[in-house]
Amino acid sequence: MGTGTPDREFQVGDVVRVSCPPAEGRVAAVSRFHASVEWPWAEIDPQSQFKWNGQRAFGMSPDSPDWTMSLFKTDPEPWNLHVGDSCLVGIPETLVRIIDIGRYDPPQDVGWLPRPHAMLVVVPADYPDEVLSEDDGDTIDLESAAPVTIELVSRS
């Protein structure tokens, strides 16, 4: 992963540019609310207390927080996907602001490998503080198996 800046240098309030080149995924399930895509990077952690199924769900509405707050996007969009379809999954270059940093020792048990030692919680860079809730944002796993690039743009 090319973080550009070691995690110990990231701070709450930093604006970072994040991206991940797209990889091919296969649509495993579609419901009224989500399209689930087989995740092309992480592997299931056989020692985990969680039984992750190797999939990531994407919101079926362009207005859904599951879609608007998610860094990872599908191409085509989830609402155009059907079970068995191939799609691309990646992070288009995006500016985000760090609103929290989680550090875990031992690494956090999340159901997949590698287990994260550090995660950034981010929102779009222009997201207003006054509407921020603890459920907002997405996470960036600094030890992700996905080839995520994170570049410091500005520090407040």
Image (tube, rainbow, N blue to C red):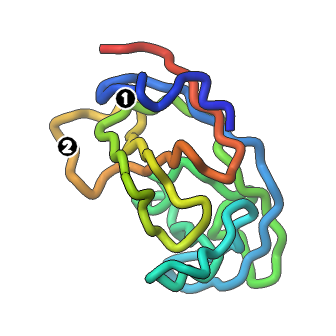
Q: Is residue 125 visible?
A: yes
Task: Give coordinates of residue 140: x percent, y percent.
Answer: 50, 46
Type of amino acid at the residue the image marks with label 1: Asp
Give the CA separation, mark 1 to mark 2: 12 Å
Type of amino acid at the residue the image marks with label 2: Val
What's the residue at 49%, 16% (across, down)?
A: 153
- The residue wearing badge 1 is 126
Q: Quadrant of residue 78?
A: bottom right
Above/below status of 68 relative to 80: above
Q: Quadrant of residue 54?
A: bottom right
What's the residue at 77%, 49% (across, down)?
A: 22
State which tag comes first along the sequence, 1 or 2.
1
Mark 1 residue crowding within 10 angstroms, few (<14) / some (14–19) / many (20+): few
**Quadrant of the image for the N terminus?**
top right
Element on which disc 2 rests: helix
Task: Give coordinates of residue 86: x percent, y percent.
Answer: 83, 70
Above/below status of 39 relative to 28: above
Task: Give coordinates of residue 6: x percent, y percent.
Answer: 52, 27
What's the residue at 60%, 52% (across, down)?
A: 72
Above/below status of 24 relative to 53: above
In the drawing, what numbered circle is on residue 131? 2
What's the residue at 54%, 76% (across, down)?
A: 34
Q: Is residue 35 visible?
A: no
Mark 2 residue crowding within 10 angstroms, few (<14) / some (14–19) / many (20+): few
Task: Give coordinates of residue 152: x percent, y percent.
Answer: 50, 19
User: How many marks can you see?
Assistant: 2
The front one of 13 and 95 is 13
In the drawing, what numbered circle is on residue 75? none
Side (left or right) of 129 relative to 92: left
CB atoms of marks 1 and 2 within 8 Å: no
**Quadrant of the image for the C terminus?**
top left
Element on which disc 1 rests: loop
